Image: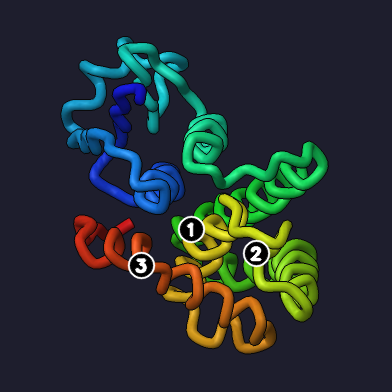
Amino acid sequence: MPEYKLIYFNAKGRAELIRWIFAYGGIPYTDERIEKDDWPAMKSTIPFGKLPCLVVDGKHLPQSLAMARYVAKQAGLVPECSLQSAYCDAVVDTLTDIGMELFKIHVMTDEEEKKKQYAEVNQKTITPALSYLNKKLEDRQWIVSDKITWADLAIGIIVGGIASRKEEFLKPYPKLASHVQKVASLPKIKEWIDKSPKTEM
């Protein structure tokens, strides 16, 4: 098995999905968390100068979703069917886009502008996406295939993370809410959640 080291700040952010996949697959890795003050000196050593970065047997792999997809394959969380694999990508990409839009709103200082932007994103992006996922889960156990995939873990961490900050966020989506809880209750995921460092983000 390759030797893995995941480099990121001491935060969940873009690295947490990768950590969940490692945890689910029981894959050993070094979880290297750096302080922001140390980042400027380290930046030039990282491809594209961005974190997270996954080091595989000494080779650096950048881009968080590329890392997550690679690790998901090692953990058996990517369907063999090419179309189902692409559907996994589509779910994760959609949820990642939503997470990024909400983060941009979160860091705004004008409260009125925050409310305005959230209402717009909710109508145009969040509601259609979550309604679709909720409907898909009405007649299936997992979101893409008859087995758990990394798309299910992405739902658990991204949708679950938003719901933890926004009261009643998932009230209109009961199937999705149950799915989030189911994923978080998976033994290896629950073990990671319980033991992982508690961080602000």
Q: Residues within 10 Å of mark 2 (few under 14, many from 20)?
A: some
Alpha carbons under labels 1 and 3: distance apart: 37 Å
Of the image marks 2 and 3, the number of the one nearer the N terminus: 2
Quadrant location of the C terminus?
bottom left
Of labels 1 and 3, earlier in sequence is 1
Identify residue type, mark 2.
Gln
Residue 54: give x, y in percent of width and height: 38, 26
Q: Secondary structure at mark 3?
A: helix
Mark 2 and mark 3: span between their CA atoms? 37 Å
In the rendered image, residue 157, in percent from the top left (x then y), is placed at 47, 61
Q: Quadrant of residue 14?
A: top left
Q: Is residue 95 visible?
A: yes
Residue depicted at 66% across the width and 72% down the height? 141
* 10 Å crowding of disc 1: few (<14), some (14-19), many (20+): few
Q: Residue at x 29, y 59 (%)?
A: 192
Side of 142 where 69 appears, left or right: left
The residue tagged 1 is 108
User: What residue is at 70 percent from the left and 62 percent from the top?
Assistant: 146
Does residue 64 appear to the left or right of 113 in the view shown? left
Q: Which residue is labeled 3 in the image?
A: 187
Q: What residue is at 65 percent from the left and 64 percent from the top?
A: 117
User: Looking at the picture, which amino acid does disc 1 mark?
Assistant: Met
Q: Amino acid at mark 3?
A: Pro
Image marks 1 and 3: residues in contact by CB distance under 8 Å: no
Note whether residue 13 is visible: no
**Tag 1, which secondary structure?**
loop
Residue at numbered disc 2: 117
Colour setup of the view? rainbow
**In this rendering, is residue 97 above or below 50?**
below
